[in-house]
Amino acid sequence: MIEASKYTRRYFMPPFPCMDWTTKEYADKPPMWCSVDLRDGNQALIIPMSLEEKLEFFGHLVRVGFKEIEIGFPAASDTEYEFCRALIERNLIPDDVAVQVLTQSREHIIQKTFEALEGCKNAVVHLYNSTSVAQRQQVFRKSKEEIIEIAETGAKLLNEYKAKTKGNFRFEYSPESFTGTEPEFAAEICNRVIDIWQPTPENKVIINLPVTVAESMSHVYAQQVEYMCKTLHNRENVIVSLHPHNDRGCAVADTELGLLAGADRVEGTLFGNGERTGNVDIITLALNMYSHGVEPGLDFTDLPEITEAYERLTRMHVYERMPYSGRLVFAAFSGSHQDAIAKGMRWRNETDPEHWNVPYLPIDPRDLGREYEGDVIRINSQSGKGGIGYLLESNYGISMPPKMREQFGYIVKGVSDRQHKELMPSEVYKIFEDTYLNSNGNVKFISAHYTQGELISSIVKVAINGCERTFTGSGNGRLDAVSDALKNGMGIDYTISTFAQNAMEQSSKSKAASYIGVTLPDGRVSWGAGIHTDIIVSSVLALISALDNSGVV
């Protein structure tokens, strides 16, 4: 059994309460977004992307709308250096996009970093060094002042190389492992760097506060971020950035509360890919904002296409239940869920409300390039009549009466149960056809002719077991006259207890769908359907279908 006493907290609270963020309900504007897919994401892959794959991925990130994209650590490998040069030399970086590169506080690394950036239109040079208690004691074995000296040395070198390198450069500093660092020390080292860089309104600097390893609950991180926002020098010219990892499964919550606490910017990845449990998922963050009516500034209107490109280029798999992105996140198999969604969608069509509020769907799937029919209403043995009915209505214009829909729902669930599989919309419609439209009964309709008098008279031709027969009858309407003819000619008794019709399309040439339920002397109800461009013919076909399914003819 695990001994919990082995562990203790590894984080530090600010020296005074930092709780202003608790008065805010939600982030009312998007942060600056920086994708780190090509650095944190790429280094976490079993097989890192090739140069051409990274170039393609960069193009996808630009199309999504990222204005800052971290492309790697140019001094770390020839591959990353060549990627940086390829972007610059092939003129693949839009004028309004800045690439971001990492560097440690070592002169030969900084020198090669600026060589890689020569001629870049816009770049962020990201300096970092570890500051946590664990890193200071175990890895570097240095004092606080020695750790500060590393940061100051790097900050000064960045100033020097910026002055002698062609290009437009901004600076970023990260006290790596910030969440395991005493807040007072984190503020001190960041302020030393800020004082060296001397930011201005035209040349702001970025101070990044990474959750390199998640150490606490999200409200603690929010207080740490708020403390930094309150104690950083020249705050009006400093962009406070967040870079949460997901060790505790709280990266999204950490980021959202960090933004409430005053942060201006977020570094993360698509789908949360990154080392260990990953980085914060920018898609989830952006669409959480969107669901609150906040325009996130990123375009995820074709999320399936983005997902396909991501899986192909990274060889990773997007989990089926990943928020917003997963293949099944909008899927409703449960009958009660399907029924509520179907009724919610009908209510929207009837009332045209201003805001989205459909049961079980926090966001409109179509906003992300998803479809209700294939992505929301999914049919298996757990499905209900509401979902099955909505699927047929939205895909094929079939709008069955409630009791008929109930009977058909049991038929469909039975098929799914026996076959042990999900049924596609086309398969559900095929069951409808086989059950009601193409039934292998004894009676086939041939023709009907009508004469108008005090009552309507009918001459009905049908084939019974392949033999043509002619029956006559009369009634108040054409369907009633046909029904009377069938009763007389075949010697059967029933009552038409339910009759409904709908146009399958909104056009003059649309087909009509008719649905009839007949009640037999023993109380059983048998259902039938008919589809034809002539509404009378469709109703006669539905009647004959119901009689075929009754077992009495």
Image: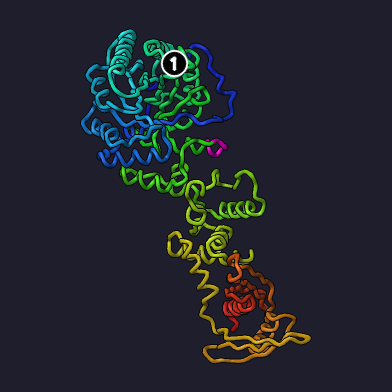
Nearer-the-camera pick, 349 or 247:
349
Residue at image coords 40%, 48%: 305
Residue 366 among magenta residues: no
Of the residues shown, which amino acid type is indicated by label 1?
Thr
Name the foreground residue: 418 vs 182. 182
Foreground residue among 3 and 156 = 156
Q: Quick check: can you spot residue 138?
A: no
Residue named by callout 1: 200
In-image side of 352 versus 108 (left or right): right
Image coords of residue 484 (percent x, y): 69, 85
Answer with the quarter of the image where residue 93 lies. top left
Examine the rendered structure and indicate whether residue 544 appears above or below residue 142: below
Q: Quadrant of the C terminus?
A: bottom right
Residue at 56 percent across and 19 percent down: it is 20
**Extreme residue toward the right, this view:** 454
Observer-nearest of 35 and 145? 35
Residue 292 within the magenta-colored segment of the rendering: yes
Classify mark 1: helix, strand or loop.
loop
Q: Which residues are magenta?
A: 289-294
If the image is split into quadrants, where does the N terminus sit? Answer: top left
From the top left corner, tell me how far across and down residue 291 is, in percent: 55, 39
Q: Position of residue 424 (x, y in %)?
A: 46, 61
